[in-house]
Amino acid sequence: MGLLTEKVFRYQFGNEPQVEEPQGRRKTYVCYKLKLLSDTVVQGSVQNKRKRHAELRFIDKICALDLDRTQRYKLTCYITWSPCPHCAGDLVAFIADHPHLSLQIFTSRLYRHWWRRYQRALQRLWKSNIPVWVMAEQGYHLEGTFPGREGEGRGEEGGDPGPSGEACCSPGLGPDWDPRSEFADCWDNFVDNETRPFQPWKKLQQYSNSTERRLQRILGRVERNL
């Protein structure tokens, strides 16, 4: 899949809770970056198809790379909708089967967040060391602990030991996290932007804050530090 058009990016990654849908329903797009240390190895994007969700197509893409299991890789995904329970389970199984990979997800919107099984899917991802963050304009995000991992939070170094015993940065973002807008990073890397800088839409950060507070409640957090 090639670069997204500006129109597709704005409509699909728009974080407004409700929109008119002249172009049809907003779909699931996954834009992903695979890094080895600080170097980007590969990046791309996929969208959901009728019989296969975007998250599963993303897994197919990474598996097809046949990555060296003696190396540590970091996967970052920008996604328009948070994963459904089925896809969350497949992502957990995928990372469990590939301990040389760490995965973090940034979502523009939460999918069916009022349904308990979708809430449990988000909790399961976090408990499996696959953090799900809300895409933001200014790099402001939840801080503190998350379920099952007291004392570890976003932006802190540390985490589970890697295959060689060294500390890896999942689920915290670690020292190489770029605090600028995830929307801007997605725009720069996955959109045919003709070298134009990202221009936030009206109330973007307000919508992000609202979505993140909702995620915070789902994860059982009681504090927010902006």
Image: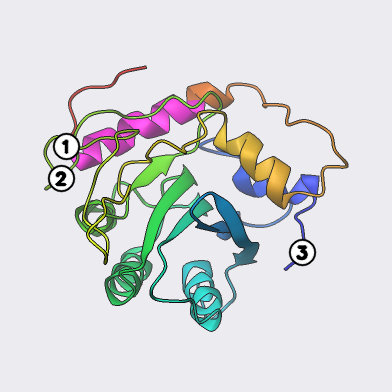
Q: Provide the residue designation for mark 2.
A: 147
Say which element carries label 1. Answer: loop
Tell me the magenta residue range.
Answer: 207-219
Quarter of the image containing the N terminus?
bottom right
Report the amino acid beneath label 2. Pro
Mark 3 or mark 1, which is nearer the start of the sequence? 3
Other residues around mark 1 within 10 Å, as few (<14) / some (14–19) / many (≥20): few
Q: Nearer the viewer, residue 213 or 97?
A: 97
Horizontal relation, residue 164 to residue 84: left or right: left
Q: Nearer the viewer, residue 42 or 142?
A: 42
User: How far is disc 2 from disc 1 in space, using C-alphas?
Assistant: 8 Å
Report the amino acid beneath label 1. Gly
Q: Provide the residue designation for mark 3.
A: 2
Mark 1 or mark 2, which is nearer the start of the sequence? 2
Other residues around mark 3 within 10 Å, as few (<14) / some (14–19) / many (≥20): few
Residue 21, placed above or below residue 60? above
Say which element carries label 3. Answer: loop
Horizontal relation, residue 134 to residue 128: left or right: right
Residue 97, placed above or below residue 209? below
Mark 3 or mark 2, which is nearer the start of the sequence? 3
